[in-house]
Image (tube, grey):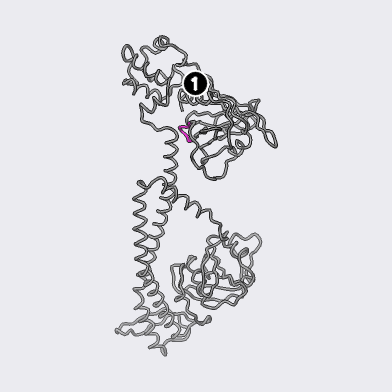
Amino acid sequence: MEGLLLAQVVDDLSARLPLQPLAWRFAGRDAVLLPLVPRDALWIYLRLPEPRIAVQGDAEETGSTPLTPFQALLQARAVGPLVGVEQPKLDRVVQFHFGPGEGFVQQPAVTLIAELTGRNGNLILVDESGVILGAHREVRSDRNRFREVRPGLAYQPPPPYDKADPRTLDRNAMEALLDGQSLRRWKAKVDGLGPTLTETVARLAGVSREEELTGASLDAALDALEHVVRDAHGAEREAWGRPDLATLRAEEVRAAHRKRVQVHLESQRTLLEKQERDAERARQAAQDADRLRAEGDLLLAYAHGVPANAATVTLPGFEGEDVTLQLDPRKSPAANAEARYDQARRREARAARADAQAARRAEERASIERDLAALDTMSDQELETRAKALEEAKRAPARGPGLRYPAPHGFTVVVGRNARENDAVTFKVARSRDVWLHVQGWTGSHVVILTEGREVPFDTVLFAAQLAAGHSKASGGDNVPVDYTLRKHVWKVKGAPAGAVHFTQQKTVYVTPSRNPTRDETEERDPDA
């Protein structure tokens, strides 16, 4: 923010001193708001590379984001009346002097220094002796070896300079100083002018920044400069159509709300796309159901010719060709056939559910696309309402570690989502008589059935086992082994990494992995089959 623009704000505040402030408020990390009695508020806007200050209405709800250490310091120490506002020359620096603060513990006077110097902008709080108490951005020697800004050091102002003050020089003196000079060189001679106000003068005067100004062009440029000196903000708006800080802030708030809503909608769309990919995989897997049933029929037809404990067998197919089948050597031919029939049923059931939910996914997808297309035309109020609802949902109290699923017979199943959460689910959430599950031979989630002292039906165990397989590296397979035991039989070796455990007295079930099992997939069966 350039010197003449700052001077206009300083003059406005100085005419109203002393002012009694209310409590500091903060709109995020980079916007500081000090409400003033009886009206308006001092805004210090630190978004780089264009930091600004303004005195404007205090109408915005600033929310309840956590305070930075500097904001907490400012809130605690700068509590007295605003008794002075200074701007050295027309530099991009403003000093706000706060008197002692009354209260249970009296706070001594402090000065808040706003350095609105482009990419190096900063806020610095100093005590009465000029020692730095804190800074919005600390600057250490590794970043600037000539000027450090950190608590405990004496505040050093930016380097001095020598330029003409356009507020005090008369027209003849300014004309003599600038005759024959291009506007590009004016800012090196005239205090308070930067690139924006130099371009403002050029636009108001109708001249180029590069041409040497003499005669009529110089007169036009001097007239424009006098307009800038009288009303820098008005001249800037006239030349650029640039909105004031209140409008800029409103635009930024709208952009933040829009971004939050957009991110949520896009994440929902991504989830639907993943669900559709899962549905397509289920449909493709179901295409193998006839083959699985035919293999089951073949095993039953030639059961007498299948050797005991065989891992593979070659049988004459119904179409006349030989068929080689992979077998579970621990099961009988009938049990191997039943396993194939079961896989066929499951695959067809998953495909049927995927097809049944297709209309719901299509409707949700269309709604999301409509909302995304309408973001730019949504009112500020609607965007704010949606964004606040998402924020409130995000702040809703967590139910503890892990994903939670309602299981058959009223049980709850908890699934860890990473190694650290696996430890929490097993050793903090689960009790000794709860049922603990983990996929056999693969990396995966710890899964716990919260029993609350009740006996667990086997279909609940199958439900949890499918989740354990679905949340593992074996999630792409069929007939995946999952071990289960009581939580009291699980222990951790001292020094072992997160999620690494030992267990004993386990049993094993074979299931098809799923992250969304249903009751028809958990029909009760013999656990030793």
Label 1 Cα neighbours within 10 Å, binned few <14 / some 14-19 / many ≥20 = many
Between 411 and 390, the residue placed more toward the observer is 390
The vertical placement of 10 against 407, above or below, is above
Q: Residue at horizontal 46%, vertical 19%? A: 191
Q: Residue at horizontal 53%, vertical 56%? A: 396
The vertical placement of 477 against 295, above or below, is above
Where residue 382 appears, x then y in whole percent? 41, 49
- Furthest toward the bottom, the residue is 304
Where residue 329 appears, x then y in whole percent? 48, 81
**Left or right of 334: which side holds 67?**
right
User: Is residue 140 rendered magenta in the image?
Assistant: no
Q: Is residue 185 visible?
A: no
The vertical placement of 129 against 261, above or below, is above
Q: Which residues are magenta?
A: 47-52
Q: Where is mark 1, residue-wise? A: 90
Q: Quadrant of residue 478?
A: bottom left
